[in-house]
Image (cartoon, rainbow, N blue to C red):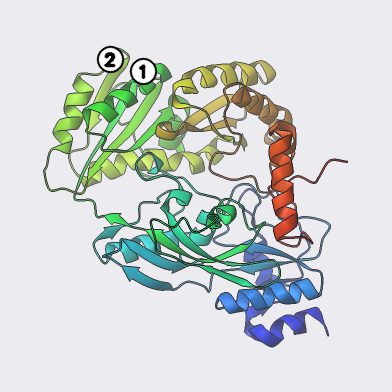
Amino acid sequence: MDFLEALSRPLGAGAVIPPGDGMAPYLAERRGLFSDRSVLAVVRPADSAGVADAVRVCAEHDVAVVPQGGNTGLCGGAAATAGRDAIILSLERLNRIRRVDADNFSLTAEAGCRLSAVQAAAGAVDRLFPLSYAAEHDCQIGGNLATNAGGMNVLRYGNARDLTLGLEVVLADGRIWNGLRALRKDNSGYDLKDLFIGAEGTLGIITAATLKLFPAIRERATAIVGLESAEAAVALFGILRAESGDTVTSCELMGRQPLSFAIAYAQGCSEPLPATYPWYLLIELTSSAHEATLARRLERALSAAPAGIGDYRIASDEDEAAAFWRLRNGIPGAQKGAGASIKNDISVPVADMPAFIEAAGTAVRDACPGVRICAFGHIGDGNIHFNLTRPEAMSDSDFLAAWDPLTRQVHDVVMTYQGSFAAEHGVGQLKPGEVSRLKDPVEQALMQRLKTVLDPHGRLNPGKVVPPPQD
């Protein structure tokens, strides 16, 4: 039987998009690095059983399965790899909120639900689902879990892994594991869900998740602070946590260069303070209580802050707070206006962030004079997007040709601080070589063994995360 016919029989012809123009939106990859790939079909199941059917048909025909959510990733994790027949398995039709349990502070959503839709479903019962980042209106919860997404609120609520109670997963042989438990305590065996969170679809395909909810936010205080150094930012962060009653939800570090790009190229962005500073912190405190004290706590903490703080501004209303956030959220897109960029998603211990920024900056400037460093990110969890924009006098193509050596230099500095070269964007097909180069051999062997046990034929998202075994 023809492969496309075999897929259409259990799923319906409307669920299978053959090669042609209809596949184009699913083949467009965010960075344009992995778009030229051979894909046999795009498959759009309507439910978990349909996902299982598609996986079984692919197993019978020895075709790889590349799961795809909102396709907002930056490491090629949802794009096919070269050299192997594959389908793109889109989860966009699995978009139902199955259950909301306000009393249990939990919600069960299918993998294709947009993150913003999950947030809205929680808000409808006066609860909060706190995972949040710039792509929340496009990304899907299955992809958030597959990459263990972080975002703006990790400091207070944790990564996607920390927000997950249970999963439903289609395995490589087409079986469905139903682990949709809404329990906070369950020591009845291995915690299997953690195998699949952050695995980028290489061990199983997440089709639904039971997620933690929290009390709705009643009060919010937002400020932007100009600082003379990254060291001052780290010191201020510690003071804020102590003086605010640990109500800091977001603490975003921004260098002057990326902030300047946002002001120049992002819509609705302007200077936040009368003078300019080398560094800025965007701070947000939140509370579920109606006490109207957060702004006073924030003012008290900022006025008692150490040397190195130049100026600050506390938002007087929601519009002003939104203007501060536009600056932060506008940075990634604004970099395009300044030319080609090389993006690094790294993490180091919070106390080591200033030293890392200094050392990595020296390394890349020595290697590429004139490179413009765009360092920004989540100071509360040590996650810095250490992005590099081409020198003004260099062409885009010449700069991008230096991608690998410049990235290796940044990652080498990361490892001297016991950090990670893949903090929240994942590994995808962009960084398996760095896994092989930098991760402990024992850790690599364990990863490869897990992959072999759960996906013995290597059909689930091949070429991602796990480097091939060394001879």
User: Would you identify the image quadrant in which residue 41 lies?
Assistant: bottom right
What's the residue at 30%, 26% (across, down)?
225
Disc 1 marks which amino acid? Answer: Ala
Q: Is residue 192 above or below residue 273?
A: below
**Residue 232, labelled with which disc?**
1
Horizontally, is 41 left or right of 268 in the view? right
Q: Nearer the viewer, residue 378 or 74?
A: 378
What's the residue at 73%, 50% (across, down)?
449
Q: Report crowding for label 1: few under 14, some 14 to 19, many 20 or more residues within 10 A (C-alpha).
A: many
What's the residue at 40%, 33% (across, down)?
380
**In whole angstroms, how far apart are the C-alphas of marks 2 and 1?**
7 Å
The residue labelled by disc 2 is: 306
What's the residue at 31%, 61% (across, down)?
105
Q: Quadrant of the N terminus?
A: bottom right
Residue 57 x, y percent position in the rendering:
74, 77
Can residue 233 be seen here? The reply is yes
